[in-house]
Structures are given as structure tokens and as C-alpha cells.
Amino acid sequence: LEALEHILTSTRPFHAGKIPQSLFAFPALKVLSLKNNQLSGHLEDIPFPLYSSLSTVEINDNQLTGHIPKSILQLKHLEYLNLESNRLSGTIKLSPFWRLEKLFFLSLSNNKISIADEEGGDFLNSLPNIYQIHLASCNLTKFPGSLRYLDKVSVLDLSSNQINDVIPSWVWENWKNQLESLNLSRNMFTALEKFPSLVHMPNLTVLDLSFNRLQGSIPIPVTAMPGKVLDYSNNNFSSILPDFGRYIRSFYLNLSKNKLNGHVPSSICSASNLNILDLSYNNFSGSLPSCLIGSGKLAVLKLRENQFNGTLPENIREECKFRTIDLNRNQIEGELPRSLSNCQQLELLDVGNNQVRGSFPSWLGILPKLRVLVLRSNQLNGTIRDLDGDRGTINQFPTLQILCLASNRFYGHLPKGWFNKFKAMMENVNEEGRVLGYYTNTTHGFYQDTVTITLKGSDLIFTKILTTFKAIDFSNYSFDGPIPESIGNLVSLHGVNMSSNNFTGQMPSSLSNLSQLESLDLSWNRISGEIPQVLTSLTSLAWLNLSYNNLVGRIPQGNQFLSFPNSSFEGNVGLCGGPLSKQCETTDSTASSALAPPEPYNLWQDRLDAILLFAFVGLGFGVGFASAITFRMFCHIKGLDCKQW
């Protein structure tokens, strides 16, 4: 074993326990890779570090605790050190790492350590040619000044710290020719020192300044490389160069949640490599550049919560690549262009809270991958036709899992078999499902879709949409007639909202088939009859609202129904039983009261019988009794009110 040079366990992960100190004692050992395991405990001091041949120490993604041994900083052959994603603690100075002359990779990210930095010192005499530095989540409060003396840095990650400072100008002055990736996200940076609107950084592929407090104009890197990520989201940027699109060579551009306003520059059409564009939550106005939708080159287009107006382009090309289109909360007018049916990869279409007109776009049902359709709060109108009536296609909306039509102008009956077409909602699967989104093949990893729907009485924002989550929202319409029994075929539904309509008839007992149902809202309708007792079988039901209908009878008792508040049933004068204060009459008392007249009338009759028998007793019992019975029959036949006599 004295000649052992490599120890690799990452290919077969899930080793547990402490790291034996003896592993570091092999004199010829050069590579120690124990990443992605469940190793725990403290790191022991390395015996005789000055004589060690170790060049690579890779112990990231474990559960190691305690301090980083000082002996690691004495490994004179060390080139690669990765200790990220553990539970290491203590205060670490950076200067000892800069004395490791051969070190080119350092990662201490995602531990419980605190970094202390010092700019002066003897380490300046022999700086390493370090290329990558990862210090994310290291409790930094200022930009490490010693980094300015490292002239070979190509990758720097200082994300998720508490740096409340300006981004120093030497970052792009010293490293502009070699910097490939710069991640300063999730800090408290307020400004960029002497940063021009355009800065030449020929090799830059990733620039992430998101989640800071940066203001002013957005800095645009001019690069010769096809980039991957430009993320300026969640800042206070207020302007951008009109011709910025000419310089965008990235795959992913996120300008969301800033203070940008005015028209979107038409130069955005020049960004030929762009695949994901997010301009949401700004104050952009005017009409959409037609190239953004008409060209169909983007995979993800998010423009929600701006002030865009006008109509959508009619001619979306047949090679459309859209997977997500989110235009929620703008001022889009007109009808949805039928050329959207060219987007065969489309999974999410959200045009909610606009001014879209027309009838229900049943023609979207031919899209084979459409999972989320949000049309809420528009000016759509008319009746909902049977899906067979439009094209006669068997597979209409085959993958649809979330359908939100709330607050439009639809009316009339829902066709009896309308729900039978939603095949994905009829599949009762127990798998966890995948997250709806788009894999970016960048440092940002997976880009997740979001959606807002009304469930459990509130607007809920789903920042992660699982393919197994199913819901329908048909609230705030003028739908009438009975709720189709076919709703019971949608056995995988988690949420149903059909409140504030004019539905009549009884509650479908088929609702008991929805075994995964968590939220049911049928409030503010004209539903009558009793609440089906079989609904107590819905043991996943956490929220129920049947208020303000015409329901009668006893509220079912058992399972989840024992947990619902009074507000779930209020406004139904015919309902009784818990949790309402109105108690139900027992079966015996109900039957006797149905056969017998009211109590005061019975009491008067008893007294009348006694008086008659007493009055005619002088005639003898038989004659007197017969006379009394004859008098009673006379009152009954004539319909006389004998109480007045």
C-alpha cells in the first residue's frame, strides 16, 4: 500500500462514518476523493503534511463537522481542494491558502465557516496561479480585497453571503481577459464601481448579479463567446442600453423584478442565441416586439406583470419551439392566434388577467404536451361546447393537468361528458412526478415554471409545478345547470374550484371518486339536496367550502368532515348538525311530529273530548260517547275550526 496513489470512492457513494487518519498517511498518495458520501465527524490532522504527496483532496458533499485542520494548509503539493457542502465551522483566514503555490482550485462553499480576509502580508511574494475560487455561503460581509492580487482567476463565486458594498472596479479591470464565470448573487451589493454600460470580457459565459440592491443602468458584457447565463433579476435596475440586444450572446437572459420601463428595445430580436427570456415584474409598456412570439425561436418567454398592450402576432411559425409562454397581468387584447397550435412543444400557456376576447379556445386541445392552461380574468365569453364538437378528435387536451378559466363571461350548461377528455386528470398515479420546467444545461441548472391559481380560498403561487398536481378552477362565471357527473372521472384532481356560479341540482356523488382531492369549493351557487354521505371517504380533503347554497339535511359526520369550520356550511338554511349550532331532529321525533298535529291543538282536543263526554254523560255512557264522536266528525268533515266553538 505504500505505493498507493489514488483513493476514489465517489463512484460508489454512501460510505458513512469518520475518515480514518491513516488514509492521509500513505506516502505516495496523490488523490483522495471521498465526495458525495455520508462521512461525518471531525477531520483529523494530516500526519507529516510536509512530506505528503497529496495534490487533490476532494471531500465535498458529506456531513463533516468541526474546524478545517491547519495541516491541510501545509500540503505543499496541493493543487485541488474541495471541502464544499459540509458542516465545517470556525473562522478561516484566506492568506494561508494563497501560500499554497500550486493551488489552482479552492472551494469552501456551503459550510458554517466565516471567512476573514487581509490584504497585506508575506503571501504577496508567492501567489498561486489559482483559477477557481468558490466561497458561497461563507458569511462574508465585504468583498475579499486579497483577491485583487490573484491575476489568473477565471471563476469566482461569492454568492449567498452578506456583502454590503460596491462591486470593485478591479474585478473587470484585472480579470476581464480571462474571467469566464462571475457569481455575486444573493448579497447586498448596491452599485458597480466605475462599471461602464458596455465592458469587454471576451471569455465571459456566466454573469449572475441577481438578488442584490443594484441600481442604475444594466451592465452588458461584450463577449466573443456564445454565453450561457446573464441574470440581473431581483435588483433595482432602471434602464438598459437601447441596442443591448446586439451584444447578447447568452442562452439565458433574466431581467425580472427590476424597475425597467418603457418599450422593449427592438434590438432584442438580434439576440439569436437566446432561448430563455424573462422580463417579468417590471414596468415595460407598449406592444410586444413581434419577433418574441412570431419567430417561435424561444423556449421560455415570461413577460408577466408588466403593462404590455396590443394583440399577439397572428403568424407564429410552424417550427415554433415554445415550451412556456407567460403573459399574465398585462393588457393584451384581441383573440388568441390560432397559429399557437403550431407550438407542439408547448407545456404552459398563461394569458390570465388580460383583455383577451373570443370563445373558449378548444382548438388548443390538439397540443400534445400542454399541461397548464390559464385563461382567468379575461373577456372570453359564450358557452362551453363539447370538445368532440370542434374537431371530433379523440385526444383533446391529453396531458392537461391545470385548467384555470375563472372570472370570464362564460355561461350555460357544461356538457355532460366534457370532463371525459382530460386523460391526464383521469390517471390515478402514485409516483412523485417531475417538476415542470426547462433544463438549461448551465450553472442555473433547471428553470422552473410557476403558476397562480385560486385554491383554498386564496390565490396560491406555485413556484414548483409537479406533473402529478392536478386542479381545475371554473369560479366566477354564470355557468348553470347541474355539475356533470363526469367530474368524478378526474380521479387524480387535487383541487376543484367551481364557486360563484349558478349551478343547480344536487352535488354529484361521483365526487367521492376523487381520492386525492385536497380542496373543494362549491360556494355561492344554487346547489340543492343533501351533502352525499360518501364524501366522508375523501380523507385527503383539507379544505371545503359549500357555503351559500340551498343544501338541506344533516351534515355528514366522520373523517375530514369533523375538522371543517362553521364557515364551510354557512348560508344553507336547511343544513343542520355539527359544526353548525342548528341541531337536527331525531328520526323518532320527526316521524311523530309528521303524524300528530301541533301540541297546543292536541291539548285543546283532549279538553274538548272531556267536556263532550261530561256534557252527554247524563244521557248514559253509550249515547253520550256516540254523540261526542258524531260532533267531532262533523267538525272535521266541514273543515270547521272547533277551537272557536
Image: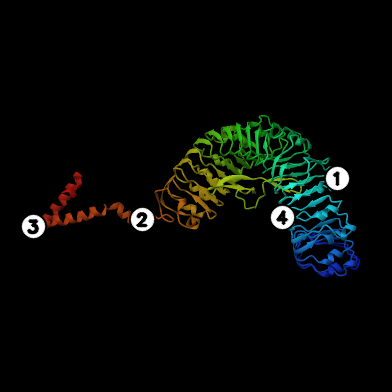
First in sequence: mark 4 vs mark 1: 4
> Is residue 15 toward the left or the right of residue 562 in the image?
right
> Is residue 196 toward the left or the right of residue 416 in the image?
right
Mark nearer the viewer, 1 or 2: 1
Which residue lies at the image location 57% right of the left edge and 41% below the top edge? 404
Which residue lies at the image location 76% right of the left edge and 36% below the top edge? 244
Towards the viewer: 629 or 156: 156
Residue at disc 4, secondary structure: loop
Residue 167 image point, x, y percent: 76, 49
Towards the viewer: 608 or 156: 156
Which residue lies at the image location 80% right of the left edge and 69% below the top edge? 44
Crowding at mark 2 (Cα within 10 Å: few <14, some 14-19, many 20+) = few
> Is residue 362 toward the left or the right of residue 601 in the image?
right
CA–CA distance between discs 3 and 1? 131 Å
Residue 216 image point, x, y percent: 71, 42
Q: Is residue 200 visible?
A: yes
Determine which residue is flagged by label 4: 162
Determine which residue is flagged by label 2: 585
Determine which residue is flagged by label 3: 618
Determine which residue is flagged by label 1: 177
